[in-house]
Image (cartoon, rainbow, N blue to C red):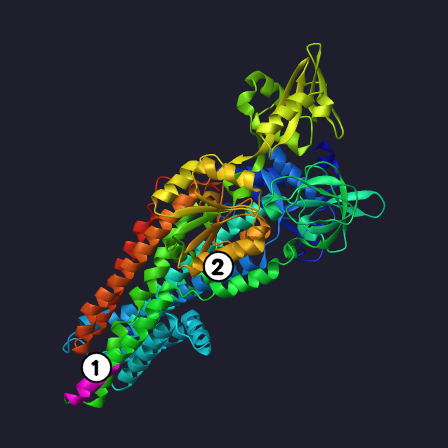
Amino acid sequence: MSEMTSMARDFSHYIRHPAPGLDRMELAVEGMNCAGCMSKIERGLKELPQITLARANLTDRRVALEWNSGTLDPSRVVDRLTELGYKSYPFEVNEAEKAEAERAGNLLRYLGVAAFAAMNVMMLSVPIWTSTDLDMTWEQRDFFHWLSAVIALPAAVYAGQPFFRSALSALRAKQTNMDVPISIGIVLAMGISLVETYQHAEHAYFDAVLMLIAFLLAGRYLDQKMRLRVRAVAANLTALKAETAAKMIGEGEVREVPIAAVQAGDIILLRPGERCGVDAVVIDGCSDVDQSLVTGESRPARVEQGAVVYSGTLNLSGALRLRVTEPADTSLLAGIERLLDNANQARSRYVRLADRASRVYAPVVHAVALVTMIGWVLAGASWHDAIVIAISVLIITCPCALGLAIPAVQTVASGAMFKSGLLLQSGDAIERLAACDTVVFDKTGTLTSPELDVANARMVPDDVLALAGRLALTSGHPMAAAVARATKAQFVVPGAREIAGQGVVADMDGREIRLGSPAFCDAQNVADEVARSEPDASIVAFADGDARYALAVRQLLREGAAGVVADLQREGLSVEIMSGDRESAVRAAANALNVRRWRAGTNPAEKFDAIEEMKGDGRRILMVGDGVNDAPALAAAHASIAPITASHLSQNIADIVFLGGRLDPLVAAIRLARKARRLMSQNLWLAVGYNLLAVPIAIAGLTTPLVAALAMSGSSLIVIMNALRGSRADAEGAAWKF
Amino acid sequence: MEVLVILVPAALMLGLAGLAAFLWSLKSGQFDDLDGAPWRALRDDE
């Protein structure tokens, strides 16, 4: 570790220049939870005299810094924050988050305009509604109507843009969505109000139009805000992983650069214990590597000159010099790309609940309006009156409640998921997740914890294990690190020294203690014995004087995994395991978890085919996986979840990413999704019920603007209140603090 | 009813002023950190 921190860190990739001579950098900060932290960080950073601006953002958990170009080494800032007790890492706002932030800003601006206009028009409408012919002349009423029109028309054109745009793009693709009837409603209501005003009529609906727009925008803004928050947290977590590479610059000079700054053709150095963040070819060196994140195979593989090392590979034993073939964001296991294309086509066929509802809603409502018009004409009414009544039907059924029914639930549910440690990445995932009847787990890194652990810890006396752990602290080797972590060791053994490639040795009260390869500890016999009972583990030997011990190091099942599997089965889901690992390892896991159906040794294409086959049988699959080899299956499944430790590719594809070392968020995800799905259909039925009450009034020609305004806000409120019931998260989900 | 000549423009102007203030606060980043801003107001070192 000491070698790593002393290497020069190059953060120039993250520096922006907002003005000439000015450097700006943003950092994600872990543990900034309160106002006290905020002050402490800002004050602590301003103690660096070069800093001209330090501003913490408590919502995003980030700090923005500015200084005069060239006066400050940015790594000083990271060190300063470490001194203050906060882990931090420079940060690059990605395009997706920028776009989401801009959309949220726009929605808030539209909402402000719509709300302003609605309030002012309401101020003019209330006198009209409450007046009689005695206290208001028709000239005054016309004047108020014209004033309303002057406010409402530009406001509706401006603030209605999100609906018009979305409706137009849907129509261009020869489809409909909820925004089509909304847009038709806005345009018709606006048009009829203008015509009526021109003809000195009694009723105009400017206030109703603006209220509709404001309500819908409020719903969309909250939804967008939640989405932005989830994305910001995900981006922070990615930044705080601090993925770096040791890049070779010229002869012998090595510099630690962020993985995002590594390009194809660069030469990098991969030391034991490091995870490779790019696809690369070995130039020289040979080593054992753990490719479980790539292939699912948990047994180390040997690589030599000319071998390909994929992103996500953990280097175990020797240093490797690599030439980068694919930089971090395009890194892909060969052949995965084609599978992904197929899978994404299949998934895009899913039609959201809201769009399905609007496909029924729009024709029905428009037909009812038409029939109403014809009916009134046949009954002897004038064309003018018939048209006004028909449009009032459209206004009163204006999909206010319908437009909020699903987004409101979605916003509340993704908020509840967020609290349970689940980051929802795609909006319609809740609906799809709720429909799943089968969970397919990957094994390595998903059911098992991605970190190595000591499997036979119970067979070794506690004090021996504790001493081995302390000795392991001195070594940088991944196996030793696993021993140190598993034993929760904190204090190094004084005088311990590492012998490269073999192990660690120290003197303890006059006797020699050693930790390392069985040969190094002279413990071949004990090691062979343990290896027989733990065939999938790597053996670390420990010698204390004359006593010999062998520790079996491998990935263990995540804590509480069996309970989670049982909970999922209790929820009525059938659970299966599909792994790229060997049969013996998969069978052991399946037995421990009481899972009857499992497949071992599957490659990415076989996983994909298996998912397709199950889908063909009419089953809805929830795929849970982390590796690059799971990516096509994740994309093909009806819904997908990945742990935060997953490969970049799988994380990007998954609908939901869960945090933490336990699987419990999965149960919370299923329960919350099913609850949300119930609330969504309840809301749709509430909206239908509202229409059944309101439409006959409109058909009868009894609608006044006052009735329209009351009905609209009333129905919206009911739908929102019902959606809020989804915020009471189940107690099972661990509460997460970010 | 002549009072309308004063009241209506006054009401609209006030509304517009409110809208302008909102748009300005939005543009100057006052909605960027809704969790941190209330605490900043309580700080006495700035």
- In screen coordinates, is A74 left or right of A292? right
User: In the image, what residue occupies the spot 31% across and 52% down?
Assistant: A724
Q: Is residue B29 visible?
A: no
Image quarter where the N terminus of chain A lies is top right
**Residue A669: x percent and y percent?**
40, 47
Is there CB contact under 8 Å for labels 1 and 2?
A: no
Residue nearest the observer in this picture, A471 or A2: A471
Q: Which residue is mark 1?
A: A372
How far across and down, in percent of the image, does residue A483 sit?
A: 61, 28
Q: Horizontally, is A331 left or right of A163 in the view?
A: right
Residue A570, by quadrant, is top left
Left or right of residue A62, residue A416 in this image: left
Looking at the rendered structure, the kind of residue marked 2 is Glu
Instruction: Please report, as a chain letter, where disc 1 is located.
Output: A
Q: Real-space Cα distance between discs 1 and 2?
A: 48 Å
- Front-lying residue, A430 or A607: A607
Image mark count: 2
What is the span of residues highlighted in magenta in the rendered image?
A: A370-379
Question: Mark 2 — residue?
Answer: A612
**Majority secondary structure of the magenta segment?**
helix
The residue type indicated by label 1 comes to: Thr
User: Residue A222: where, in percent of width, then height?
Assistant: 40, 57
